[in-house]
Image: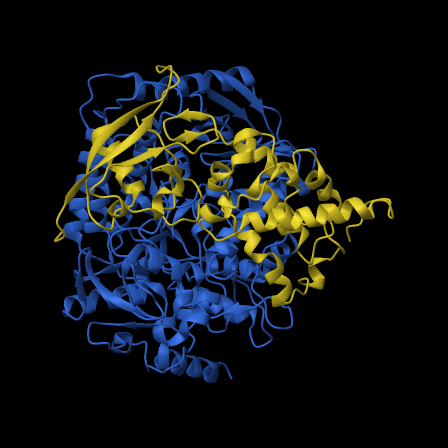
Chain colours: A blue, B yellow
Amino acid sequence: MEIFKADVVIVGGGGAGLRAAIAVAESDPALRIALVSKVYPMRSHTVAAEGGAAGVKLPSDSLDYHFSDTVGGGDWLCEQDVVEYFVARCSAELTQLEHWGCPWSRTADGQVNVRAFGGMKIERTWFAADKTGFHMLHTLFQTSIKYPSIKRFDEHFCVDLVVEEGRAQGVVTIEIASGEFTLIEAGSVIIATGGAGRVFRENTNGGVVTGDGMALAYRHGVPLRDMEFVQYHPTCMPGTGLLFTEACRGEGGFLVNKDGYRYLQDYGLGPAEPTPRNKAMELGPRDRLSQAFWYEQQKGRTIEGPHGSVVYLDLRHLGEAKLRERLPQIYELAEQYLGVDPAKAPIPVRPAVHYTMGGILVDGLCSSPLPGLYAAGECSSVGIHGANRLGSNSLSELLVFGKVAGEEAARFAKSVAPGNTASLHKQAQAVEQRVLGLKTKTGGSERIATLRKEMAQTMEDGCGIYRLAETMQKTCDKLDELKARFRNVNVEDKSSVWNTEWLLAIELEYQLDVAQSMAHSALQRRESRGAHQRLDGFEQRDDANFLKHSQAHYVADGPPRIDYGPVKITKSPPGTRAYGAAGEKAERERKASHA
Amino acid sequence: MPEQQKTIEIEVLRYNPETDQVPYAQVFAVPFTDDMSVLQGVQYIKDYLDGSLSFRWSCRMAICGSCGMMINGEPSLSCQTFLRDYYPERVRVEALAHFPIERDLVINMEGFIEKLESIQPYIIPKEARTLAQGEYLQTPAQLNAYEQFSSCINCLLCYAACPQFGLNKDFVGPAALTLLHRYNMDSRDGGQAERMQLVNAEEGVFNCTAVGYCSEVCPKHVDPANAVNLNKTNSAMDYFLRFLAPKGGTK
């Protein structure tokens, strides 16, 4: 086994991991940084983000507005002090990315342009056409090349953390090309491995989004917070779940049912107007839009397609020229994958799983309860998304909290003495034996793909847009069964070089743990809030009993233990979440009461 | 699924360095529907027919750049190439041409990463600016001068298409030269003089014989052939101006 000694090791080379690496490098060029990623960094799923990144830009906007939109959008399950910190730093971070070369779309006079996005009161979404995540990721990756202290471990798969003397002191990885193990020792560890959307059947996520870092932290005793909150994006490609960005609606697209009717006006989001109005209709928040789809389906007002019910995303009135300029990728996706010319015909869409609001419990400085362990980005729960994330807050989150995690992990690494290599090595060797065992054992009969598909189906059945105790319980039981069957998994491929079947088995085990944390957290939240909606007697938000964060604790060989932590309320007491005309009325009343 | 299910033959070039002397072809019968990509076909093989088949993939929507393969001899992203376009004939998938095969459909792309690192793919500011001063102003026309060249997803189809790279692995090649050009053309950047040394060098632009196949296979319309050939002009200009100015004639 190779041993590499770093000061800070970062697991995950997407937006948050790269931003963290640069922050460590800039805070002290003498620190050795190991950046571990199971894919080349530019393949990370940040690449697929389309619409944009939020940061106050216009004179008519304010940090208070961004704060209120975020906290209200999250159905008041946000850490308000963290949100306040976040909104105050978004624009500086987005400007930093501009200085590093990100090709932000511009206004005629050369300033960065902003567009409207769901649940946002004022246009504040910075965008690079409809490939914002792609451009941010490549800008960060290419900029990271400037820093000689960043040592990349590309296509290295992280199999465990090493924890000693009560603190995280490194990771164990497999080099995918050779199957060789490496122990990377470090004074601190940052997890930036992204979300876990692939535990669901129909999702927008890339194959890499398997919750690896969440599972690793969880198994080492760090709680996963608010895991029941999983975002369904309302406009996705039937069958594959590929994403049609919310920017389609930000630019003025309509959602219509089989009668050509803009049905969102029936769900408290109206009135329907010909041009987009912020926080109304198609620019409502994602949870509400996905829920409205579900009701339309119940009413028989959707269209039946080969991959289930759909509604139409109608962009025709925007015209080909604007679509090509603002939404070029969407144009091509519709043409190539669906054979639909969006300037001439509406695009069939349905909701699909998109984002994991919950994650590794960390404080506002990205520090987890396990000393030396930090987390940033979608894998973490720093507290800004609450029960429902607003579109374009997550790309800004990568930057703001990637930087914080990097700076904090650097500071921590400098404060601790080097670890005991001999005993860390011994631990790593035990990890190697365990992980190799998965590959070398014989006699298994369960196919990886079968278990994975059954997991994804039961998650969709039990933890979809609307939830019932009975089906959630079935999902919990099914996950128990799948975990038992996993012990009998068969890895046919015994080779060392590029053994992706072995890695898929390891990922599946991560996913089963993360799925369990989601299903049990969901079952035990007996209220409806944000993306967690129940139809079995708990249809209302229940602040008296559930204005609190769930925390799922790993239990070996059993279901997770769920307990709860407080929600930090600073200046926005829980109120009614209202959009459209009702939202505007509520805001006028709030203002009048403060006057 | 109401659609009639058909079966297509997929011929895959297999190679496991631990057991095989040379690559060999293996044929799988894969049930498919008209909306299935070649990637989905290959995934079906891995899931149900042979778990040992190795390939890279992730986003499924032609933006992560992982899943490039030779499909019936053409460099293609397997996620945006559809089985229906080959049926009822057999479709052949192989690792990208001109790269060493690590295993099955997985190529070794370290060489490309080194080239990318060598071109200084980051802004070397023309004028320093603090965050407090806000963004650099860049008009839509200035953005337009490089935006297309910034859309490269590093999928390497252009290298698999490039006959010169096939002959000379040291050629910096279409994607890396395009990214070099992308930074040179950025109004915020002042690093052109440094980068031109690589453009002019033996492994630089003059390797290109203007075949143009790179641009044809590019899934993102980046047009690397155009970027490379613009740099031939720049390089020639740089050569002549070098006699007049100490650091070359750029900017």
Identified at 26% across, 65% down, the residue is A291
Using the image, determine if residue A130 lies above or below residue A463.
below
Using the image, determine if residue A196 lies above or below residue B144.
above
Identified at 52% across, 60% down, the residue is A128
Give how far across and how far down residue B226 sits, in percent: 58, 51
Left or right, A259 with respect to A199, comes to left
Depth check: A456 or B192 in front? B192
Give how far across and how far down residue B138 sits, in percent: 65, 64
Identified at 27% across, 68% down, the residue is A312
Quarter of image, res A255? bottom left
Left or right, A22 with respect to A269, comes to right
Depth check: B239 or A470 in front? B239
Give how far across and how far down residue A436 sits, in percent: 35, 19
Depth check: A514 or A562 in front? A514
Looking at the image, can residue A46 be seen? no
Depth check: A588 or A181 in front? A181
Using the image, determine if residue B67 lies above or below residue B151.
above
Looking at the image, can residue A219 be seen? yes
